[in-house]
């Protein structure tokens, strides 16, 4: 995890109470995205009409003087099927307050080392446009309408912004332009409604709901991070993520966003969120009331993830004070997760923790909390035992701790570091099936929204799906089948 600086849940049809439905969920493909890197790219400059910039380590776009870039992708090796999505990814070396436009190019004869402004192909229709963006981030543009399958695709990129914008070229190595293609295993089903960015609302889960409902074991829960919008900037980097949320760079104080998040998790059969909590008065502490409010009247519950144990060894008195605070401020809220009437608190820890941690938490828990500690070597032999145990290790695809818990991760790619766990939807589907079959009490998703580490199942622009909920939640919705 992580260092941080310091659809409404139930959108009903207006009068009938019925929810809008997408096509049959069994038709949602579980294909793995395939990434193609540019085979040629260059920019051309009107003020230097005879010059070639094909070997530059950057691409450029500028409205004045006219500067545009050309990119070629060769897509090959795709099995027969329908292209479900095609996302152009360009790395931004500098910001652009208007974004850029992506055009089709009919002329395939230009070459990287021969193209100039004078001989450059004319631009065709606009395929799609990006949103404004900051420097040091990947910009994703949906060009699915242009990519039909195997073939050679030529694109031009330009901008009306009169500030020269630098973008990564293929000479930039890891920041070369990418085309991420997801091939459906069968024809994409026709929707009865046509959402593209906003998830289709889901109907209210069965059960009593409201103030009295609590889930029973096995409980599927997801680690959740109410750090935003503050955490979109970390270590001087904005946005601090290799991916882009489908909902944009949102605020965790926005009730509409929180309700959409709950709807998304419920769609993935997730019954509870485990929200990062850094102590009394912290930035995350100010977000918890909003989470509970967003879940009011639904069959969704929240617990807290006690993070400060990872920063040292809080004393028994400090832990007791914090548990009392959690009980008084949140634990009695109807939307708070309870097991056998006890309010649930998960606890993160550092790598040096041993049985002494379990001793401190057992002594401190005088208020009836249901405590789930993070495991460490030899935890099962400790004299003091909490109510349950879990592992938080998202660089591993799956982890089982006996009947206590089973945790799975879609991927791990911390911003600014090499990718440690590549995303693979087929592997993810198997992990979900294994988790569902495990019988473990806690079936944990690591994570819903930790964008900095790239462990999210929240819908992102690189894994959009016809359901509107994204491919990773689609898999959770069908339990990997």
Image: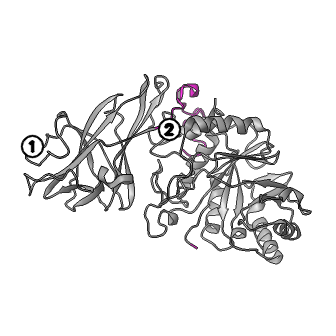
> What are the residue bounds of the magenta stretch?
6-33
Label 2 environment density (alpha carbons within 10 Å; few <14, some 14–19, many ≥20): many
The quarter of the picture where the N terminus appears is: bottom right
Residue 26: name its quadrant. top right
**Residue pictured at 82% horizontal, 77% vertical:** 317
Find disc 1 in the rendering and name its residue. 119
Q: Which mark is residue 33?
A: none
**Image location (x, y in percent) of residue 434:** 71, 36
Is residue 19 a member of the stretch shown in magenta?
A: yes
**Image location (x, y in percent) of residue 24:** 56, 25
Tell me, yes or no, if residue 169 can be seen here: no
Q: Element under label 1?
A: loop
Q: Nearer the viewer, residue 125 or 195?
A: 125
Vertical position of residue 36 compared to residue 418: above or below: above
Q: Counting residues from the N terminus, which is met first, the one under dot 2 or under dot 1?
A: 1
Q: Which mark is residue 468?
A: 2
Q: Element under label 2?
A: loop
Specify the principal SS of the magenta part: loop
> Do the numbered discs 2 and 1 sit on residues whose CB atoms are within 8 Å?
no
**Residue pictured at 46% horizontal, 22% vertical:** 187
Is residue 45 a member of the stretch shown in magenta?
A: no
């Amino acid at each position: 995890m992580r260092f941080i600086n310091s659809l409404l849940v139930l959108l009903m049809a207006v009068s009938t109470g019925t929810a809008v439905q997408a096509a049959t969920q069994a038709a949602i493909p579980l294909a793995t995205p395939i990434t193609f890197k540019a085979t040629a790219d260059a920019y051309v400059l009107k003020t230097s009409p005879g010059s070639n910039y094909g070997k530059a380590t950057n691409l450029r776009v500028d409205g004045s003087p006219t500067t545009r870039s050309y990119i070629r992708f060769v897509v090959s090796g795709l099995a027969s099927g329908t292209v479900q999505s095609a996302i152009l990814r360009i790395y931004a070396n500098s910001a652009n307050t208007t974004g850029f436009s992506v055009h089709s190019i009919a002329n395939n004869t230009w070459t990287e080392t021969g193209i100039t402004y004078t001989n450059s192909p004319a631009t065709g229709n606009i395929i799609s446009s990006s949103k404004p963006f900051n420097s040091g981030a990947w910009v994703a543009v949906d060009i699915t309408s242009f990519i039909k399958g195997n073939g050679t695709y030529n694109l031009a990129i330009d901008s009306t912004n009169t500030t020269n914008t630098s973008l990564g070229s293929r000479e930039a190595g890891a920041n070369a332009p990418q085309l991420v293609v997801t091939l459906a295993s069968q024809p994409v089903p026709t929707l009865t409604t046509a959402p593209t960015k906003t998830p289709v609302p889901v109907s209210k889960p069965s059960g009593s709901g409201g103030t009295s409902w609590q889930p029973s074991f096995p409980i599927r829960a997801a680690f959740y991070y109410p750090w935003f919008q503050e955490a979109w900037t970390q270590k001087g980097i904005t946005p601090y993520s290799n991916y882009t949320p489908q909902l944009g760079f949102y605020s965790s104080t926005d009730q509409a966003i929180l309700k959409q998040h709950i709807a998304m998790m419920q769609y993935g059969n997730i019954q509870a969120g485990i929200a990062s909590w850094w102590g009394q008065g912290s930035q995350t502490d100010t977000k918890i009331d909003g989470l509970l409010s967003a879940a009011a009247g639904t069959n969704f519950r929240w617990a807290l993830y006690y993070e400060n144990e990872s920063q040292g060894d809080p004393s028994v008195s400090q832990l007791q004070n914090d548990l009392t605070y959690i009980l008084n401020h949140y634990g009695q809220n109807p939307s708070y997760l309870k097991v056998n009437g006890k309010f649930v608190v998960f606890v993160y820890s550092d790598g040096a923790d041993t049985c002494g941690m379990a001793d401190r938490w057992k002594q401190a828990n005088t208020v009836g909390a249901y405590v789930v500690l993070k495991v460490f070597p030899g935890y099962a032999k400790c004299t003091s035992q909490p109510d349950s145990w879990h592992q938080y290790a998202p660089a591993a695809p799956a982890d089982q701790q006996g009947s206590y818990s089973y945790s799975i991760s879609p991927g791990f790619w911390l911003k600014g570091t090499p990718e440690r766990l590549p995303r693979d939807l087929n592997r993810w589907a198997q992990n979900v099936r294994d988790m569902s079959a495990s019988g473990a009490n806690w079936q944990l998703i690591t994570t819903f929204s930790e964008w900095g580490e790239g462990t999210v199942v929240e819908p992102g622009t690189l894994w959009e799906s016809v359901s509107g909920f994204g491919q990773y939640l689609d898999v959770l919705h069908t339990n990997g089948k």
